Image (tube, coloured by chain):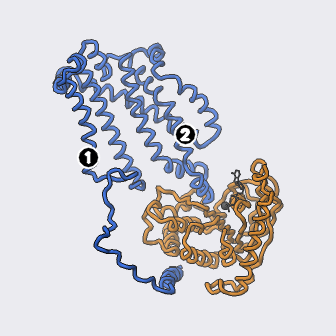
Chain colours: A orange, B blue
Amino acid sequence: MTKGLSVQNLTKAFGETRVLDDVSFVIEPGEFVTIVGASGCGKSTLLRILAGLEFSDAGSVTCSSHPIEGPGVERAMVFQDYSLFPWLSVMDNVLFSRRLSTNEDDNLALERGAEEARAQNLLSLIGLSKVKSAYPSQLSGGMRQRVAIARALMSKPAVLLMDEPFGALDAQTREVMQDLVLDVVREEGTTIVFVTHDVEEAIYLGSRVVLMAPYPGRIDSIYDVALPSPRTDDIRLEPKFMELKRRITSRVRETAAASFDGADPSSSS
Amino acid sequence: MVENLFAWDGRMIAMDAGRATKPRELEPAAGSGTPPNRRRPRLWAIRGTLSSKTYAAIAVLGIALPFLLWIGLLSLGAVPKLFMPAPIEVVGRFANWVTNEGFAADLWISVQRVTLGFALSLAIALPLGLLCGTFKPCEAFLEPAFDFVRYMPAVAFVPLMLLWCGIGEASKVSVIFIGTFFQMLLMFADDVRRVPMQQIEAAQTMGATSREILFRVILPSSAPALLTTSRVTLGWAWTYLVVAEMVAANSGIGYAILKAQRFLQTDKIFAGLIVIGLIGLLQDQFMRALRAVLFPYLKGR
Ligand SMILES: Nc1ncnc2c1ncn2[C@@H]1O[C@H](COP(=O)(O)OP(=O)(O)OP(=O)(O)O)[C@@H](O)[C@H]1O
Ligand SMILES: [Mg+2]
């Protein structure tokens, strides 16, 4: 059931601006890959192409060797900002995908009762079972983002695409959410592509960190995170972890600075 | 999964306990001179709130003031009686209208015309508006054409409608239809276009079909805006009704007002205007109540 992703020679431009330039990489089934890079280097665009919401100009994108031709249930996405349905309660938001015709006969094949049990489980996992009948407008920003994650997980997607899902959360909730996501991966074998600004978060979560550089958006380097796999909080203090963090952070700065030295097309005119 | 629940709870507790130093007790700022930090009701706070009592009091003032002005002008003798009757005369004339001059029949026929014209508009504009706001080909096909028609004043269609439909009900209903339909369609389409793209894309990544996105995301997401648009256009429907009745009718409130003018019954004109205002007020209150019932999730926003 787990699926991998493959991107070959991907190129994408919006008008004159090259947003992605010859991007290639392979993500193994069940792998957790994080993407970091300066603002505007095309991280969101890449993720949206993987989700099937945006299309490339050249190159190929496949999910377990099938070309991606549009959005699909097997590739769930958690957006940078809130995308909950305000007219539905928390519970109904989580159950939304299960009420769609296309999902009645998919791999999950849950009974009605089992669906609700799973939604209930996910809600307690994210610590929100008490507010399951509240409306999104009654929740805090962090709570809403947690609901969005539960909603994306509901259909047991093979691939979960996350675009800075914890950007708006406070440091503590953020760490709890990171462990939650790691738990889910371990239990369900979900392949995850996770975009973040936070290098520490990228190392903590990912088995590989992809560093992208801007103008034009491209892959600068890929770092293997050789750290013991069931991550614990202490790992953040290990010398290896801190060394990697230092290396990646300074490289992100270099690529961002290079883009300001005239490489940025918008500053040259 | 249940273990994870405890992991979550355990972590939260651990985090609380792990706080290195307890924050010092805050200095009690309750010096006798410092006022407590209570929210004081401020009348002119930006986006402030009012207690329902204060609100009602100010509203009554706003409604009563024109009446006081009216009475004031009369008692000064500044305007001739013929142009401006006293409130008591208007009430008397209205009572007479109800008992002897067939007010109920006038009201009934007017309400019928508005309802019919408005319902017809709504029934066609709603599906078309949904399509125009969702699918570009529909937009391209309809909107430029309708933008063109929209700027032709509906009132100018009255002679044409009289020619085409005669002086029967059809001409009145079609004037109301023309006056509301084009505007309504374009406003509905705009409402639909304002549905956040993230909501639509989230549904797409959960495997929703176009049909499901239309009915399970776009329609419920834009429903409050659609209701507001309907409320506004219902007001216009009354305007066009009166126009139609003044030009081409022998019944209805608009016709009654026109007839009153012929007989110099200024008091009846006043009564007719106030009746239309009251109907509008009632309708508005009803639509607002409907909004609260249909969209409980909007409460307090
Ligand atoms: N729909 C669009 N039309 C035109 N340009 C776009 C569009 N979407 C993105 N871009 C451009 O593509 C570039 C990459 O955008 P993208 O959102 O992928 O960056 P990002 O790496 O996610 O940035 P951030 O970290 O700030 O979220 C930016 O220069 C942006 O201006
Ligand atoms: Mg982004």
Q: Position of residue A106 (x, y in %)?
A: 62, 64
Viewer-side residue, A69 vs B240:
B240
How busy is the neighbourhood of tag 2: few (under 14 within 10 Å), some, or many (20 plus)? many
- Please give the chain letter of the residue carrying mark 1: B
Question: Residue A230: in sight, yes or no?
Answer: no
Q: Quadrant of ligand 1?
A: bottom right
Identity of the residue furthest to the front in this view: B33
Q: Going by the image, does A25 lie left or right of B47?
A: right
Q: Which quarter of the picture shows residue B272?
A: top left
User: Dividing the image into 4 quarters, which one contains the C terminus of chain B?
Assistant: bottom left
Q: Which residue is mark 1?
A: B56
Give the residue displayed 47% in from the left and 42% down from the top. Answer: B226
Q: Secondary structure at mark 2?
A: helix
Q: Amino acid at mark 2?
A: Ala
Query: Real-space Cα distance between discs 1 and 2?
Result: 36 Å
Query: Where B61 sits versus B163, above or below?
Result: below
Badges 1 and 2: C-beta atoms under 8 Å apart? no
Q: Which residue is mark 2?
A: B189
Query: Where B184 sits versus A179, above or below?
Result: above
